[in-house]
Image: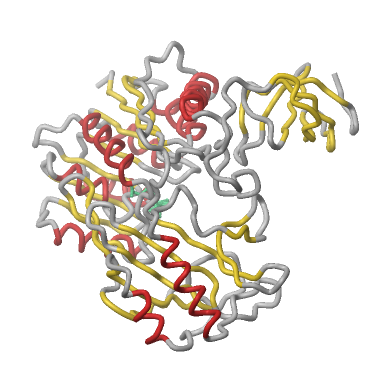
Amino acid sequence: MEFRKNDILTLDIEDCGVDGEGIGKADGFTVFVKDAVIGDRIKAKIIKAKKNYGYGRLMEVITPSPYRVKPACSIARQCGGCQLQALSYEQQLKFKEKKVRGHLERIGGFQNLDMEPIMGMEAPYHYRNKAQFPVGKNKDGKIITGFYAGRTHSIIDNRECILGVKQNKEVLDRVIGHMEKYHVQPYDEATGKGLVRHIMIRYGFHTDEMMVCLILNGDKIPAEKALVESLCEIPEMTSITINVNKKRNNVILGDQLRLLWGQSYITDSIGDISYQISPLSFFQVNPIQTEKLYGKALEYAGLTGNETVWDLYCGIGTISLFLAQKAKFVRGVEIVPQAIDNARENAKLNGIENVEFFVGKAEEVLPREYEKNGVYADVIVVDPPRKGCDEVLLNTILKMKPERVVYVSCDSATLARDLKVLCAEDYELVRVSTTDMFPQGVHVEVVCCLHRVNS
Ligand code: SAH
């Protein structure tokens, strides 16, 4: 059946989109409705209609979802940071499990999957070790900082995000206070004028080390010394840097970094391994859940000490070093050269010598090393970005025939697509584990274990 603009429909909301909008279906027509929650029965007015789907405005909640809760944050609805706060945490976990199962079944073609119970958080707030706060002005010209509203770049004033560490507020108060006192202007995206773009804060959960990095549309900030003195009154302060980004684009960080005080990095650990984290490094944002996720990857790798392992898409070597503790030798591949510099430093820092890192695309390095140098793998671990693995890489894995493949994924749809290729003939999906790395948000991490069935 076709629907048109202004039609009014009754919908049962069964799913949630990437921006947290509720999704319901009427006669095969899919409708996305902002502010509707999974489990709601609602009336929606169609505001935009395509052939098979449309967007609706929430007109009335006929029967509220039994899973609706009052969001813990008062601005959850406007803010683009969280999508699921109006859904109970228990139900968020069920939704994520269902999403992963749905993708594996529909896209991957796997049936009756035995999935391990999703690993949620005991306290699903204040878990993020990193936050990047944009700085701007409100209508009255007052300097504000917080998060972007959903789908826009208008800033919602909030210094107390409940996903971040409590110390963030103290830093923001001091930086904004300094800007007010010395008349430092925030950056304005529309004109490209003004100085302060973002305030990045990182916190080491195990070390209590704190990093502040100011991202500026310029080389310095007025009265630097006074700002440093003020920030150093925070007991955990370890690193204060300035990052210069004079480009007129949406990328947050520029390439240049200048140390204002302390060290240019903080240290934190996952399990027994320490990592140095600079303002430019990628590091998982939820340290508590990362430990569980890597624990699963290690368990699935089934290492006894004799294995040669490849860790593809290795970033700063987090998983590689974790695995190196139990493997004979680990080789990591990553496209970003600075991340590989960090990986090598981190190996040294931990006295780990049975690792080697390669800069390059996984789909180029692995085929080259296999064809030219005949490299071998007992276990291959992949942790690709959301778009998943390149087909060339999957085909090389099939040729190399490792005993086990461990697939760590942040997007279950591309995961399912790739597993279908690997499991067409030679591999069997034996275990699936889901970790909630982003409570209150829609994303979820999955680790899968594949065993070779044909020799
Ligand atoms: N395993 C790491 C990082 C995972 S994020 C960790 O857990 O910390 C995915 C990583 O893949 C990023 O570091 C990104 O830079 C890298 N990447 C993206 N495309 C790539 C490619 N084609 N080949 C190798 N690495 C790639």
The quadrant holding residue 52 is: top right
**Residue occupying the point 83% across, 23% down:** 9
**Quarter-of-image position of residue 66:** top right
What is the count of numbered marks? 0
Q: Nearer the viewer, residue 404 or 139?
A: 139
Left or right? Give the position of 403 relative to 161: left
Q: Residue at x 65, y 77 (%)?
A: 192
Q: Is residue 108 visible to the viewer in this orientation of the structure?
A: no
Residue 55 seen from this side: yes
The image shows residue 46 at horizontal and vertical percentages of 84, 32
Q: Quadrant of residue 154?
A: bottom right
How far across and down, in percent of the image, does residue 166 sit?
39, 55
Judging depth in this view, the residue of 148 and 388 nearest the camera is: 148
Q: For the C terminus, which image quadrant? A: top left
Q: Is residue 87 above or below residue 332?
A: above
Color theme of the render? secondary structure
Which residue is pictured at 55% across the width and 37% down the height?
85
Percent position of residue 178, x then y: 48, 79
Give the quarter of the figure containing the N terminus.
top right
Q: Is residue 19 above or below residue 62?
A: below
19 relative to 346 in the view: left or right? right
From the viewer's perspective, is residue 98 above or below residue 320? above
Q: How far across and how far down the image is residue 136, in percent?
A: 61, 70
